[in-house]
Image (cartoon, helix red, strand yellow):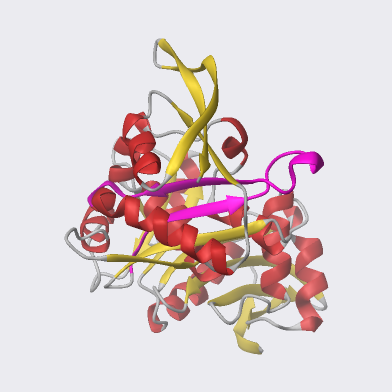
Amino acid sequence: MITQLGNVRLRTGEKMIVKCIEPPEERYREKLMRFLEHKDDLWMRDISERLKGNYSEFCIDRYFIEEIGENVISQMWYGISKKTKMGNFGHVYTEPEYRKKGITNELMKFFLDDFQRSKGKALFCGTGSPWIADIYKKYGFQLIKKDTDCGPMVLIKPEYAKDFKELEDEYFQPGLSVNARIGNIGDQFDCDKVLAYSTGLEKLSQNWHQVFLTSQISTFMQALFKVEDGKGLVTVAESTKGSIVGYAFILALGSLMEDGAKTLDFIIHPNYINDAVRFVEETIKIRQKEKIENIRCYVCSGDKEKLSILLEAGFKEEAGLSDYCFLGNSYFDLKMLVYI
């Protein structure tokens, strides 16, 4: 769907047309793919799938563009989960010859108006420099870490929360029960933004690591792409209020000779650590329906809480490598566990 939002005239006299594109829209898919080809492979895949409309069951994606004639000269995007209403903002780009002419400022006005009218609660974005962070602050974005001058930021509707701490406290409210279900792209922003940026997960990560094969998968999106490639499954831990408080994957991560073996790993917010064993057990039950066999996991012996959860969930130690992991100032063993 293409919606024309308005016209803007530059100081040079050139007239721009502002449009909102909601996939799938074949007419603009190739244009935007070329326009954003500076992105890395992971993001290009995500952009391609969204522009094709392949994620429209779970997400709302909107691309705001400015055109002069037939040429797209500037664009930005936001996407929100249809279920949780958490989202992401980014892919802001203007052609070099049109920069410093106020084009992005004009586009931001249309984007902000649309977001405020949407059902979205919060949008996350990343900034790599203080001057970009300062620009986004003018439009209501806040730095998640108050002691930094750039990095992850969030735009929150005031009726939902005043800042990320309040959002986090509300989102990860303790005391709720948790169930496992198969994850989908609609969970991406909750896992890779809300959960990943939470102070609770930051504290947990000091004694909770991904090691050996599991270190290949550092985000929910990476895990989900493996699933799309037929390499296994990913689950999420969903609270009774709909918050995504953790995720797990069972994926083929080794060589072709090891393709029959699947590696499990998981992460869960500390407020729900008491539900971790059940979450792993439910994930294993889901894999039985998916006919996934031969599950392994790799754990650093220094991650005692994680190791204890896996053992209680039914894994047994099969092999290991002495002093394989270096954490802090000490070496720890790498333990390979198998599900019996």
Q: From this view, report whether residue 123 is shown above or below residue 330.
A: below
Pick the residue in front: 171 or 24: 171
| Residue lying farthest to the front in this orientation | 340
Residue name at image x 40 percent, y 74 percent:
85
Range of the magenta residues? 243-271
Pick the residue in front: 112 or 271: 271
Query: Where residue 43 sits in the image (x, y, percent)?
Result: 67, 55
Query: Where residue 311 sits in the image (x, y, percent)?
Result: 38, 40
Residue name at image x 46 percent, y 59 percent:
283
Tally of numbered discs:
0
Residue name at image x 80 percent, y 82 percent:
27
| Residue lying farthest to the left in this orientation | 175
Please indicate, yes or no, whether residue 149 appears anywhere in the rendered image: yes
Q: Is residue 329 left or right of residue 89?
A: left
Q: Is residue 266 magenta?
A: yes
Query: Where residue 94 sits in the image (x, y, percent)?
Result: 68, 59
Please indicate, yes or no, whether residue 141 appears anywhere in the rendered image: no
Residue 102: quarter of image: bottom right
Q: Is residue 185 magenta?
A: no
Pick the residue in front: 334 or 52: 334
Residue 263: quarter of image: top right
Pick the residue in front: 143 or 294: 294
Residue 73: quarter of image: bottom right
Position of the N terminus by quadrant: bottom right
Query: Where residue 22 sits in the image (x, y, percent)?
Result: 63, 82
